[in-house]
Amino acid sequence: MNARERLRLLILAVLERQPEHGYAIAQAIKARSDGLLNAREGTLYPALHALEAEGLVESQEHEVGGRVRREYRLTGKGGGALAKSRQAWEKQVRAVGAVIGGGA
């Protein structure tokens, strides 16, 4: 799984809990990873737009405090893609663990 695919997985996982706007998605990724992972604006928004174009997320504009924010939510198709991506990630983690796990 390359960096682009990992970012997509992270975004879908954040949106699984609740709809969020872009900045909140980035903050959730950072917070849940104890600051180890960052979703920078230059990669986050293109990924969100691609996910929306594929029908995995949908967005709607809302006015909050006089500002318009675009809120993203996971679609049913996105939930299926998330499950598939999780399986691929877990398989990859097991494979790496088997190689670096130590022991005789």
Image (cartoon, rainbow, N blue to C red):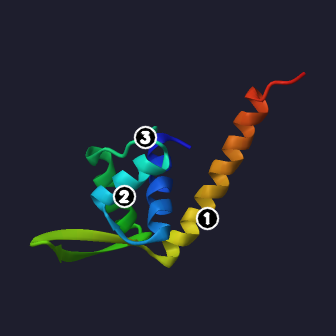
From this view, report whether residue 74 is shown above or below residue 45: below
Q: Which residue is mark 2?
A: 25
Q: Image quadrant for the C terminus? A: top right
Residue 58 falls left or right of residue 75: left
Which is in the foreground here, disc 1 or disc 2? 2
Residue in front for this viewpoint, 29 or 81:
29
Residue placed farthest to the left in the image? 66
N-terminal-most mark, 1 or 2: 2
Q: Are marks 1 and 2 in contact (CB under 8 Å)?
A: no
Q: Position of residue 54 (x, y in %)?
A: 41, 67
Secondary structure beneath disc 2? helix
Q: Residue 19: x and y, percent? A: 38, 72
Q: Nearer the viewer, mark 3 or mark 2?
A: 3
Q: Quadrant of residue 84?
A: bottom right
The first of marks 1 and 3 along the sequence is: 3
Q: Residues within 10 Å of mark 3 (few under 14, many from 20)?
A: few
Pointer 3 residue: 35
Residue 55: x, y in percent? 41, 72
Where residue 3 appears, as percent x and y from the top left, is 47, 41
Q: Which residue is mark 1?
A: 83
Residue at mark 1 to residue at mark 2: CA–CA distance: 19 Å
C-alpha gap between disc 1 and disc 3: 24 Å
Amino acid type indicated by mark 3 = Gly
- Left or right position of 50 against 95: left
In which quadrant will I find the N terminus? top right
Residue appearing at x 41%, y 55% in the figure: 28
For this view, does 35 lie left or right of residue 71? right
Q: Which of marks 2 and 3 precedes in the sequence?
A: 2
Query: Could you tell me the amino acid type at mark 1?
Result: Ala
Q: Is residue 26 shown above or below 3?
A: below
Residues at circles 1 and 3 in contact by the CB criterion of under 8 Å: no
